[in-house]
Image: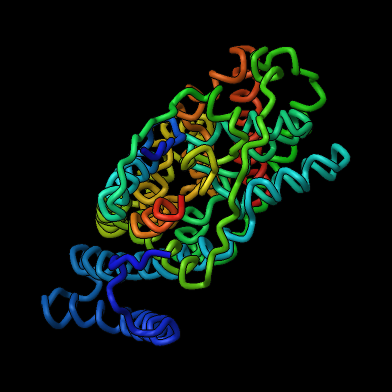
Amino acid sequence: MTTLAVRRPRPPLPVIVVTAVAAWLVAWFANAPLADWAAFSLLRLERGSHLGEAVAFFLLDVPKVLLLLLGIVTVVTLVRGFFSPEKVRATLAGRGLLAGTVAAASFGIVTPFCSCSAVPLFIGFVEAGVPLGVTFAFLISSPMVNEVALVLLWGLFGPGIALTYMAAGLVVAIAGGLVIGRLHLERYVEDYVWQIQAQGRPIIEVRLTWADRLSDAWRYTRDLVRKITPYLLVGIGVGAFIHGFVPTDLVVSLGGRGNPLAVPLVVLIAIPLYSNAAGTIPVVQALLEKGMPLGTTLAFMMAITAISLPEFVILRRVIKPQLLAVFAAVVIVGILAIGYLFNLLIA
Amino acid sequence: MIRIEVLGPGCANCQKLASNAREAATMAGVEAQIVKVTDYREIAQHGILATPGLIIDGVIRSYGRVPSAGDIAAWLSEA
C-alpha cells in the first residue's frame, strides 16, 4: 500500500464532534437575545414599529434557520448513509401492493435522490420487479417529504405544522401510488426499460468508517447550505417585509377562505418555484401569520417540493407521455385535495 | 493505463466526481483515461441505482456519493 500525502493532520474525531456540537448549542441559545439586542439596542429601532419588527424578525430567523439546517441536515445525511437504495429496493420487491406502497412512501422520507438519479432508480426498481405503483409512491414522497422542507417548517412554523405536512405528504404519495398501481399502466413504460438486464459487474464494497461518514455528511451539508443560503436570505427578507408592512386584510382577501380559487392559484404559482423550499417557506410563514388558511399554505408548499418540471423532463426518458400525464395529474389532484380538505376541517 | 469511468448524466455531482478523479490520477502519479458515461441506458446496465458512479478498471468502486480525490487516489494505486 502506497502512502499518499493527501490527508492534512486533524484533531481526533471525538474532539471535532464535541466542539462542533458545543458551538452549535451556544449559537442556538445566544441567537434570540443577540437578535433582540442588535435590532433594538445596537440599531436603536423602536419596539413595535414596522421597521423594528421587520428587522428583528430577519435577524432572528436567518441564524435560526441556518443553524437548524447545518445541524439537522448533517444528522439526517449521516443516518441516510445506512439506507442504501439497494436495501430499499430489496425490501420493496418482496411485498404486497398495499404494504409495499406504504413502505415506499415512508422510505421516501429518509432517502431523497437528486433528479439525475431518478432514471437509474426507476429502471433499477422496475427491473427488480418492484410494482409500478410502489415505484411511483417512492418517486412522489421522496422529493415532497424531504428533510430541508421539514427542517424549515419545524423551525419557522413549529412541530405541529411540520408533522401535519409530513403526514399529508405520505397520504398523497400512498394514494397516488395505489391509484397508479390500479390503472395498470405498465405498457406506458418505455419498451427498452423492460429489456435492460443489469450485468453483474463486480462491486468492491467500500467499508465506510465513521470518520468517512461524518466527513461525507458534513461536506454534503456544507455544499447544500452554501447553495440555498442566497435564496433563504431573499425569502426571509421578503417574509420580514410582509411581517412588518403588509396589512392582514390584503392577504385574507386574496388567499383567504373567501376566495375558492386560492388553492389552485397557489399551486399554479408554485410550479415555477420548483424545489426552492428555502426561498419560499419563510414567505409562506409570513403569509400564514397574516391569515392565509392552513390548507392553502400546505398545498402551496407541497406543490413547490413535489411538482418539478425538470424531473418530469428527465422521467420522460423512461415513461411515455400518457403515464407522465397520469403521474402529474395524480400529484396535482392529491395536493388540491389536501388543500381543500384542511381548509374545510380547520375553520 | 487505468480506465476510469464516471457514470452520470452530467449533473453537478458527476462533474465534481470527474474532476476529483482527474486530481486523484495526478496525486497517485498514474496514467488514467477518464471516460464519462452519460447515457441512461448504459448507466442502468451497470446496475447502479444512484448516480454518480465510479468504475475503475471495470470494478464499481462507489456510487451515489462523491468520494474525495484522496480516496480515489488510494483506489488507483491498488488497481
Query: In the rendered image, is residue A156 in sight?
Result: no
Q: Residue at x 80, y 40 (%)?
A: A93
Q: Quadrant of residue B41?
A: top right
In this figure, which colouring scheme has been used for the structure? rainbow
B50 vs A186: above or below:
below
Query: In the rendered image, is residue A297 in sight?
Result: yes
Q: Residue at x 18, y 78 (%)?
A: A38
B67 vs B2: above or below:
below
Q: Nearer the viewer, residue A98 or B43?
A: B43
Task: Residue A293: give x, y in percent of width and height.
Answer: 52, 48
Q: Nearer the viewer, residue A201 or A306?
A: A201
Q: Nearer the viewer, residue A124 or A332?
A: A124
Image quarter of the N terminus of chain A: bottom left
Q: Nearer the viewer, residue A50 or A308?
A: A308
Q: Residue at x 72, y 43 (%)?
A: A89
Task: Residue A109: give x, y in percent of width and height.
Answer: 62, 52
Question: Is residue A281 found left or right of A320 in the rendered image?
Answer: left
Task: Residue A74: give x, y in percent of width and height.
Answer: 46, 66
Task: Residue A288: give x, y in percent of width and height.
Answer: 45, 53
Q: Residue at x 75, y 31 (%)?
A: A133
Question: Is residue B63 found left or right of A184 in the rendered image?
Answer: left
A17 vs A181: above or below:
below
